Image: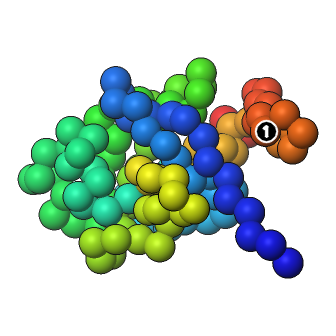
Amino acid sequence: MGRHFMFAAGGYGERDLTFFVDSGLVHLLEDGGTRRQAAVLATRSQYRTWGVAPGELSGTHLRAARPLRLGPLEQDGHLLSIAPGRRPPWSDLGGVRVDGLLSQAFLARYAWTLDFDRHEYTFRPGSRP
């Protein structure tokens, strides 16, 4: 069985990025008694290139100070997870530089599908907030 990778253009604030799209669970954090799922997984060095200050990268998670974007979609207030190590296995897939892994915490707000013939994602508002 062959491998398949799902990439998409997105961003963090004004910074344009390429995300590995992963519909699975990335990371949970207990936040004031509530479990929150991280929307993005990236390394400290990747976050620094996005303009995140080193002082914000001391723990395992941080709150997004800027909106996350996926194509024309934009969301505020997400939890970001810091990947252990310096080079995650998805940072260069098939010659494509990947800036971070975008997860279900972002995608859950939409019903979405892939058009494999056109190589396009299609999104519409979902039923979950």
As displayed, is residue 93 above or below residue 2?
above
Residue 57 horizontal side relative to residue 85, left or right:
left
The amino acid on which the numbered mark 1 sits, given as a three-letter code, is: His
**Rendered location of residue 116, percent (x, y):** 87, 44
Q: Quadrant of the N terminus?
A: bottom right
Q: Quadrant of residue 110?
A: top right
Name the image colouring.
rainbow
Quick one: SS at disc 1? loop
Query: In the image, residue 44 lies at what x, y percent?
Result: 24, 60
Query: In the rendered image, is residue 37 in sight?
Result: no
Residue 3, horizontal then vertical, whole percent: 74, 70
- In the picture, measured across the screen, residue 54 lies left or right of residue 50, that is left
**Residue at horizontal 20 percent and vertical 49 percent from the top:** 48
Above or below — where is 59 with respect to 126?
below
Q: Is residue 6 visible?
A: yes
* Residue drawn at point x = 41 percent, y = 71 percent: 88
